[in-house]
Amino acid sequence: MARSKSLRTARKQDPLLLRRLLRAKDRMDAASHEAWPVARLARVSGVSQAHFARSFKDAFGVPPHRYLLTRRIEQAAALLRDSDLPITEIALQTGWSSLGTFGRTFRDVTGKSPSELRAWQRRTAHRLEVVPHCFVSAAQRPNLTIAVSEKRRRATGDMGAPDNAEEGSCS
C-alpha cells in the first residue's frame, strides 16, 4: 500500500522535478561508494535540501540514505558472490569506512554476516544457474523496510516472531 501511495504521489509531481530526482538517483547508482549527503544530492537536483529529501521519498518510496544503503548492500552481496576479494576490501569498495558498521548493517539487512552469506551463496550457486539473473537479483535485493522494522522490534525487546507481513508480497 505504501508503494502504491508513493507511485500516486510521484505521478502528481512535476516531471521536471522527477527528472532532477532521477539525475541524483543515477549519480548515487554510478558512485554509491562515495558519500552522498542530502546537501550534495540537493545540489545535483537543483532544489533545497528539505524539498529534495521529501520529494525523493515521495517519488521512490524510501529516503535517499536508505536507498543508498540498499545499493551498497546489493553491491557488497554481488561482490561476495562473484569474487574472492577479502571482506574488508569489499566493505571499502562499496563505500563503508568502518568494517564493524559494514558487518552490523549487512547482518541487520540480510540476516547473515558477510562471510555467512558468501558461504551460503557458494553452497547454493548451482541451484540458481537455471533462474534468470534478473529474478535472482530481485529476490536477493535487501528490503530495508523489513530490516528496519526487525531492528526496532529487537530494540523494544519483543522477541516473538518477526513482522514479515511484507515478505510474501511480490513487488
Image (cartoon, helix red, strand yellow):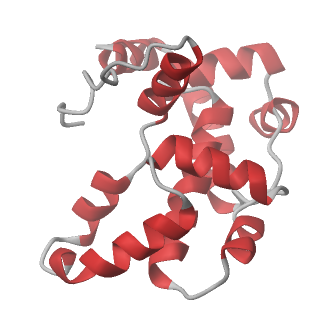
Q: Nearer the viewer, residue 28 or 112?
A: 112
Picture quarter with the C terminus: top left
Determine the residue positioned at 68% across, 42% down.
24
Q: Nearer the viewer, residue 16 or 98?
A: 98
Q: Is residue 67 above or below residue 113?
A: above
Q: Is residue 57 above or below residue 95?
A: above
Quadrant for residue 29, please give it: bottom right
Instruction: Pinpoint residue 136: horizontal percent, then vertical percent.
Output: 27, 63
Instruction: Pinpoint residue 139: horizontal percent, then vertical percent.
Output: 28, 53
Specify whether 101 is left or right of 54.
Answer: right
Picture quarter with the N terminus: top left
Q: Is residue 48 visible?
A: no
Instruction: Pinpoint residue 43: horizontal percent, then vertical percent.
Output: 85, 35
Instruction: Pinpoint residue 14: horizontal percent, then vertical percent.
Output: 54, 18
Specify whether 152 is left or right of 88.
Answer: left
Q: Nearer the viewer, residue 114 or 76?
A: 114
Determine the residue positioned at 61% across, 34% down.
66
The count of marks equals 0
Determine the residue positioned at 20% across, 84% down.
126
